[in-house]
Image (tube, helix red, strand yellow):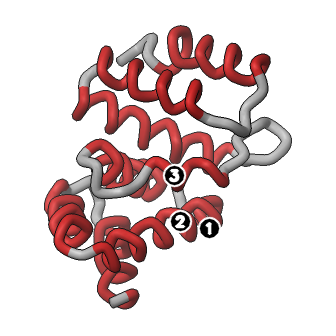
Amino acid sequence: LNYIVSILVECCIQEDKYLNYYSQIAEILCKVSKIFKKLFEIAFLETCKTIFRYKINKIKISGNFFGYLFSTGSLSWICFSNMIITILHSNSSIRIFLKYILITIILILGKNFSKKLLKNIVFNSQKLHIYEKKNIINLIYGGIFKDY
């Protein structure tokens, strides 16, 4: 089963432009079986670890792929809990990847719903300090949603 997931992700990334077809197949697989959902979550974390190897277009396509899965509820938001996204702990590739994930989520769910969803995730997080929560909320209202 792991082979099916990795082939599906790789086929999507190898296309010249993002095709929703692969995301829809992944969504169906995730909703049919919890095993596939777990495997796609593992594939997401593996992609985060190796995203620096990809060119910009492939980063964009993979961000769209996983953004679609997050926005349809096929992947759990807990995947983001282990990620540390600061200037010191991340590179530009992972930030671009996350940008396209968020853009896809905004386009699918809508701007207002996405703001509420991200705000709830941030406020319900036990790991974040008050200062970090304020910075993230400012990012949500000021930076990420400004253009979309």
**CA separation in Å, label 2 and label 1:** 5 Å
Q: Earlier in the sequence, mark 2 or mark 3?
A: 2
Give x and y (percent) for residue 144.
50, 21
Secondary element type, mark 1: helix
- Residue at x-position 37% and y-position 54%: 66
Q: Amino acid at mark 3?
A: Ile
Residue 19, visible in the rendered structure: yes
Q: Are marks 2 and 1 in contact (CB under 8 Å)?
A: yes
Q: Is residue 69 left or right of residue 130?
A: left
Q: How many marks?
A: 3
**CA separation in Å, label 2 and label 3:** 16 Å
Q: Amino acid at mark 1?
A: Thr
Image-quadrant location for residue 4: bottom left
Q: Is residue 85 left or right of residue 59?
A: right
Give x and y (percent) for residue 29.
21, 72
Q: Earlier in the sequence, mark 3 or mark 1?
A: 1
Q: Tell which of 64 and 30 is nearer to you.
A: 30
- Residue indicated by mark 2: 47
Q: Tell which of 55 and 138 is nearer to you.
A: 138
| 98 is higher (above) or lower (below) than 122 | below
- Residue indicated by mark 3: 78
Give x and y (percent) for residue 11.
30, 74
**CA separation in Å, label 3 and label 1:** 19 Å
Q: Quadrant of the C terminus?
A: top left
Secondary element type, mark 2: helix
Q: Are marks 2 and 3 in contact (CB under 8 Å)?
A: no
- Residue indicated by mark 1: 50
Give x and y (percent) for residue 50.
62, 67
